[in-house]
Image (cartoon, grey):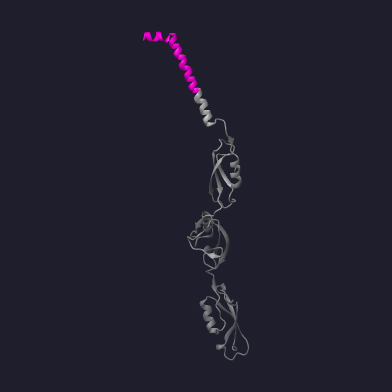
Amino acid sequence: MRKFFQYLATPDFRKQAIIAAVTFFIILTSLYVGLRYYTRHGEGKPVPNLKGLSVENAVQLLNSEGLRYQIDSIFMLDKKPGLVLEQDPDPDTNVKIGRMIYLTIVSSQTPDVNFPDIENKTYLEAKSTLENYGLKLGDTTYRSDIARDAVLGFTYAGQPLQVGQKIPKGSKIDLILGDGNGASEVQLPDLVGLTLSEATFSLKGASLNLGSVTYQGAIKDSANAVIILQTPSVVPDSVVKVSIGTPINVILSNNH
C-alpha cells in the first residue's frame, strides 16, 4: 500500500493522469458536438396555426414549410366539411423540418344511423332519443287519438320509416302525434239515403244524437222518407269526426 501511494506522487503517474483527463475531455467534447450535429440541435421552425383552415390550404402551407402531414376525419353536423378542427403538435411548437403534423378535419361523408324505436313514446322522449342518435326533429302533425302527444307515426322525406332502417345522420324526422281527443270524438256517419229509423239507429251506435228533423216537399209516407241532407255533413273521401253527443240535423223527402 505504501508503494502505491509513493507511485501516486511520481511524475510518471501525473503524466498518465493528465493524458487520461485530456483524452476523456476530447471524447466528451466529440460526443457533444457529434450529437448536436446529428440531431441538428436548435434547428427547426414553429408549426403554423392550421385550425379553421380548409384542408387544401393547410396541406399547401405544410408543404411550403417542409413539414409532413397525416389526416384523420370526424363527422360534425354544424361544421363545414373539410375544415381543420385539431392539430398535433399545437401551433407555434418548434419542430424540425420533415416533422409529421397530425390533422383532424370535418368529414364530408355523412354516416348512417339505425332509426330508433320511438313509437308510442311521448314527444319529449322521442325528441331526446332522436337527438341521441344524431337526428333532427322536423315537422309535427296531430291525429285524433286518446294518447296526447304520443308518437303514432314518423316519416323521413315524406316516406314512412321502419325501426332499424338506416338513414343519414342529421336527417329531419317528421312526427305524427296524438291530440288526446280520441276518446271524445267519433266518426260522423253518412246518413244520406237512410230512413229516419235507420238514421236514429246509426246515430245511437255512434254515440250521437238526432237533431232537428225537417221534411222537404209533399210527404206521403214519412216512414219511407229518406234523408237527403244532414248537418254536419260528410265530406267525400275523408273522415269527419265530431264530439260525442253532437246533434245531427237531417232533411227528409219522399222524392228521391
Quick one: quadrant of the N terminus?
A: top left
Q: Against 38, is 225 above or below?
A: below
At 44% from the left edge and 14% from the top edge, which residue is drawn? 16
Q: Is residue 17 left or right of residue 141?
A: left
Q: Against 203, is 41 above or below?
A: above
Q: Quadrant location of residue 140? A: bottom right
Q: Against 241, is 93 above or below?
A: above
Residue 49 visible in rendering: no
Percent position of residue 238, x then y: 57, 74
- Nearest to the observer: residue 212 or residue 241: 241
- Nearest to the observer: residue 251 or residue 104: 104
Percent position of residue 66, x then y: 58, 39
Q: Quadrant location of residue 209? A: bottom right
Percent position of residue 104, x then y: 55, 46
Query: For residue 26: magenta?
Result: yes
Query: For residue 242: magenta?
Result: no
At 49% from the left edge and 20% from the top edge, which residue is drawn? 26
Provide the major secondary structure of the magenta segment: helix
Return the residue found at the far bottom: 220
The stretch in magenta equals 1-28
